[in-house]
Amino acid sequence: MSSLFANVLNELSKIAYRKKTWFFLAATLLLSIGGGLLLANAQSGFGIGAVTSGDYPIKLLGLFTVFFLPLFVFMGAADLFSGEQGDRTMKILLTRPLSRFKVFASKQISLCLVIAAYLILALVGSAIASLFLSGGLTPNAVLDWAVAYGAAFVPLAALSFIAVFLAQFFSTASGALTVSLLLYVAAKAGALFFPQASSYSPATYLDWHTLWLGNPMAMGQTLNVFMFLVACSILFFTAGFYFFDKKEL
Amino acid sequence: MDTIVEIEGLTKTFRNRRGIRDISLSVRRGDVYGFFGPNGAGKTTVMKIMAGLSRADRGKVRLFGHDVAANYEQAMAKVGVLIETAEAYGYMSGRKNLEMAARFYPGLPASRVDEVLELVGLSNVQRERVDQYSLGMKQRLGLAAAVLSKPELLVLDEPTNGLDIEGTVHIREIILRLAREERTTFFLSSHLVHEMELMCNRIGILHEGKLIREGPRSELLGGRFATLEELFLHEVREERRAIAHV
């Protein structure tokens, strides 16, 4: 087993051992299923069908990518880096025959894998909930869900690279989490006041998945945003590693 | 006899101007090398640089011929480390901590985790969460994690720190047993002179960041000094006198 893969497994084990991981996973499933059930109940009570079964997973994804999943991303990055530095367990890893690049990369990979797991769970939960809503389900709608949830991974992964970069400047998980959240809220609020500047903020593109659902799809814009997110990811990964590599414990 | 540890001109200065100056030494296979000095002498700084946790301003550390700064994975492949306090993931069991560490050593048999748990006397509490362990148990778990890969070199910084008498004796016995039976090379630090006398065949005396004396224990004592304590006090006085003359 390569040491990089070994540490990805270890990082996933650590994430799985934390109670808050299971809380977030349970919340993801409950929110997606429970939300669907509540909506179905409310809509049948009022006799309206504002959200159909085909729409529900996409609407829910919009909420998840703006509020819920960024919180998990910031928390995950803070725990894996600042948290481990604060409780001095980072030392355990950095004294094994594993280069700092592999330590850094394996933690980042693990965080991205967990983001993917959350998206899959949210998709499954919302797909189950959509069965309770009115409106016919078509194969195209199901394909749209898969495409949207898959596309949503890209901006969330980019956000995780930024969160990991920020975590390098803190030695406690709470400090990293607080600052990451404040910057995220500032970026979201800033977009309202300075719409031109917001195009340079990766937080603006968390709803990137909606571009994939247009008919016809805006290929040029979708590609532009994709390139921007990839560029941000590379930039913040490199900068994050630079600071991680310089750390003295 | 081949050289396992080579340290050349190691220098590091912290913002408070303390640090280490021009440390050079070598450790040969089978040595139990004791790095002795008072608190704040710079022992942990040297060991952190050896383990890649910190970087030197100048100088080099080579382990098994590999430069730690340039070739970390190869340099650390046969090294076990325990620096300052033993750390472990408190939300996991002692066993799980060791199983995770074992993943970094592909050829290691699954039974090795049981072996080291037995060696440090933690078999009966292996499934308990580490945050329920006492300080001594955590220290023993740290030692178990350090010896897990059957390393040829063990770098242990104050391995008996915070242990009671029984725990101290137990750790000392493990070190002596590994040195005797498995020919493990040790690079140990301690500020406890008695411990050094009982375990080490070579000694390096560190004072205010400078290696003031180094060599085989018997040679250093050389009939002139009954104990390491006497030798240390003599060397420190000589060092101060030399500085005063300059």
Image (cartoon, rainbow, N blue to C red):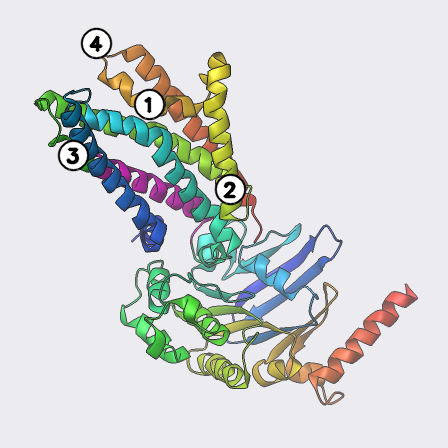
Q: Residue at x 35, y 79 (%)?
A: B118
- Mark 4 and mark 3 in contact (Cβ < 8 Å)? no
Looking at marks 1 and 3 on the same chain, the residue that comes earlier in the sequence is marked by 3
Q: Quadrant of residue A76?
A: top left
Q: Residue at x 59, y 57 (%)?
A: B49
* Residue for badge 3: A129
Local secondary structure at mark 2: helix
Q: How far is the residue under mark 4 from the one under mark 2? A: 41 Å
Local secondary structure at mark 3: helix
Can residue B29 be seen?
A: no
* Residue for badge 1: A207
Q: Which residues are magenta?
A: A98-123
For the C terminus of chain A, the quadrant is: bottom right
* Residue for badge 2: A176
Q: Position of residue A104 (x, y in %)?
A: 43, 44
Q: Amino acid at mark 1?
A: Asp
| In the displayed structure image, the side of residue A84 where residue B203 appears, left or right | right
Looking at marks 1 and 2 on the same chain, the residue that comes earlier in the sequence is marked by 2
Looking at marks 3 and 4 on the same chain, the residue that comes earlier in the sequence is marked by 3
Can residue B159 be seen?
A: yes
Which one is closest to the eye, mark 3 or mark 2? 3
Q: Is circle 1 on the same chain as circle 4?
A: yes
Q: Residue at x 32, y 16 (%)?
A: A223
Q: Amino acid at mark 4?
A: Pro
Which one is closest to the eye, mark 1 or mark 4? 1
